[in-house]
Image (cartoon, grey):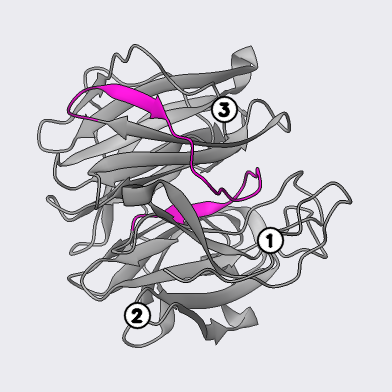
Amino acid sequence: TAYDWSIGKLYLIGGIDGPTPDLSYPLRDVWVYNTSTRCWTLLLDSEEFYNAMQRDAMALDPYSQQIVLYATFVDPEGGPGMDVQTWIYDISENTFKNVTSGTEPPLRWGSRMVYDDESRRAILFGGTDGYTYTTLNDTWAFDFETKNWKKMEPTESPPPHHFAAMAYHPLADRVVLFGGFYNETDTSLNDTWTYDYNENTWTEVDTAVSPPARLYHTLAWDVWSNRMILFGGVAKPYKPLYGDTWALDLEKKSWTQLSPSREPHARAWHVMQGTWGGPLLFGGSKSHSQYIYDDTWIYKSYYDRWILINVSKIPQDKDDDDDDDEEDAE
C-alpha cells in the first residue's frame, strides 16, 4: 500500500486472495481507498501487468503522482522467472510502465520500501537474496526523476532483516525500522533503527522497552499523536500470532504497549499506512491460509480505539468473535 497525503487516498496493488494462498500472488488489481468518503474503489484489474503486480515493495511520490514498484521473480517476457524489474504506476493515467534501468537492487524478497518526502526518494532496505537465501542489510534509494536506483552504502547498517516493518516519520525526517527475521540464525528481531537519507546514516534507537520480536507486522506514522503505531505479526514463521498495538515516541525514544478498547483480530501479512484519519489497516491472515481478512480498520489515538470501517463476511474459526460484524461511526 501507499498513501498520498496531498489528496487523502491510499492505493493497494495486488496481493494474495483467499482461494489460492500459495504465494503465487494471483491478484493483479489496483484499488484506492478515499479517507473522506471511506470507500474502496477498483481502478484496474488486468492480466497484462503480471510483472508489475509481482512487486516486493512499493512507494508513492505525491509530486509526480507515480508509484514505484520493485518487482522480483519475473521473466522479461512476463510470468515467473528470476529477473528484477522497476515499474511505475501512473495514478492520473491509471496504467503501468516498465522503467527498468539496470540499476536495480539484486533479486530478493521480503524487503521493505518507504517514501522519504524530504529527499523525494523511495528508500528500500533488506530482504532475502533470491539465489543464496542470505538475509540482506543493504540500503537503496530510487530517484523518481531519473528512474534510477542508487546503493547508499552507509558506514553502519542494521543487521540483516527479512520482512521487517518500515515507515517514514515526516516531522523527524527519518525512516523508522522495527523487527524482522534473520534467516541464518533462525532469529526474530525486535530492534529499532532510523535512517537519515541526507546524512546516509542508520542509527539504532536504544529503548528501555520494546515490543516482542516479530515479523510480518506493520508500522505507520500517526499524524494525531506524532507516534509510530505498530500492529500484529508473528513471533516466528508462522506462529505464535500477535494482535497487540504499540506506539513509538521517537523523540523520547520510548515504546509503549497500548490497550485499545477495541482491536482487529490478531493477524500477520496485513498492510497499514498512516492517513489523515489515523493509521489505516487492511487485510492479513491468521495462518497464511484461506482465512484471509478483507476488513478495514483505522486507529484513533485520541481515544485509543480501533474503528472498524467496513466488513465483508470472511471465513471464521468457531472460536472467533462475531461482534465485529458491524460498522462503527466515527
What range is drawn magenta here?
250-274
The spot of residue 208 in percent (x, y) is 34, 11
Labelled disc at residue 280 = none
Element under disc 1: loop
Q: Position of residue 304 (x, y in %)?
A: 40, 46
Q: Main secondary structure of the magenta part?
A: loop
For residue 214, which numbered disc appears in the image? 3
Residue highlighted by disc 2: 91
The numbered mark, 3 or 2, whose residue comes first in the sequence reads: 2
- Disc 3 and disc 2: Cα gap in Å? 33 Å
Quadrant of the drawing holding the N terminus:
bottom left
Mark 2 packing: few (<14 Cα in 10 Å), some, or many (20+)? Answer: some
Q: Which of marks 3 and 1 is nearer the N terminus?
A: 1
Marks 3,2: beta carbons within 8 A? no
Classify residue 239 by image quadrant.
top right
Q: Can you say whether 79 is above or below 126 in the image?
A: below
Check the image and report above or below for 65 versus 220.
Answer: below
Picture residue at 63% right of the left edge, 43% below the top = 268
Query: x, y percentage for residue 109?
Result: 56, 42
